[in-house]
Amino acid sequence: MNKRRVMGLAGLVALCAFNVGAQAGDPAQVDRGRYLVTIAGCNDCHTPGFMEKNLAVPEKDWLRGSAVGFQGPWGTTYAANLRRVLAGLTAAQWVEYARLQRRPPMPSYALQRMSSDDLQAIYAYVRSLGDPGDAAPAYVPPGGVVTTPYLVMVPQGAEQAAANAR
Ligand code: HEC
């Protein structure tokens, strides 16, 4: 193979890599992904402070994951840093991965019922967000030691309600 041919192949490889990048950054896809993430409520859990402040949280802080756990009979779960998770996957891998069953309170059904096109738009959007930041803390099984703040997701006041009803 002569030198020119090698250069040609290298150029082709570079072009393919560029095209993949261009697809991930397609502005129409990114806009659709932003729209889907917003209306599906992903930020409520995956963005710190979003439940309290809603859209007042700037987009530069979206989907970085939360270090406040959700504790219930399933143990203690943390909403993942989606920027980091998606940075480790190709778009095709993401479409499979997104549909896996998760622990509460992740609404797994939302991603399981989402079309592949919509999942790819979410991929393009999340990948466009840049700087991933730190991972969320790891899942702690029931009875394990929890070292972060957490919300207890257990119905309260059942005994009082029953007493009042008597
Ligand atoms: C009510 C809170 C809540 C909402 C709303 C929510 N998530 Fe989650 N999500 C979680 C929690 C908690 C986990 C961790 C579950 C576990 O440990 O199995 C999680 C896990 C995930 C994971 C798996 C990450 C990994 O690699 O471990 C993905 C992907 C994900 N969420 C995407 C989304 C998307 C996209 C949306 C919006 C459609 C969304 N989530 C909405 C709470 C939420």
Image (cartoon, helix red, strand yellow):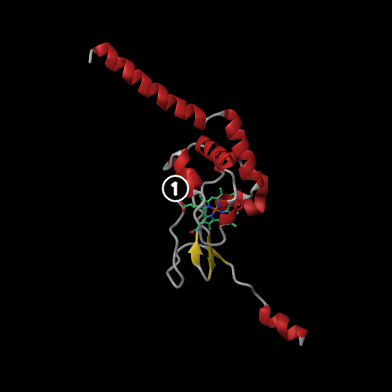
In percent of width and height, residue 79 lies at 52, 55
Mark 1: which amino acid? Asp
- Outermost residue on the left side: it is 1
Name the quadrant containing residue 108: bottom right
In percent of width and height, residue 65 lies at 51, 50
Is residue 161 placed above or below 40 in the rendered structure? below
- Outermost residue on the right side: it is 165
Q: Nearer the viewer, residue 62 or 34?
A: 34
Q: Secondary structure at mark 1?
A: loop
Q: Which residue is mark 1?
A: 134
| Horizontal arrangement in the rendering, residue 24 relative to residue 43 (left or right) | left
Disc 1 residue crowd, few under 14, some 14–19, many 20+, Cα 10 Å: some
In percent of width and height, residue 86 lies at 47, 43
Task: Tell me what residue is drawn at x 49 percent, y 54 percent.
Answer: 100
Is residue 124 placed above or below 51 in the rendered structure? above
Task: Tell me what residue is drawn at x 58 percent, y 34 percent.
Answer: 30
Q: Is residue 133 visible?
A: no
Q: Nearer the viewer, residue 45 or 56?
A: 45
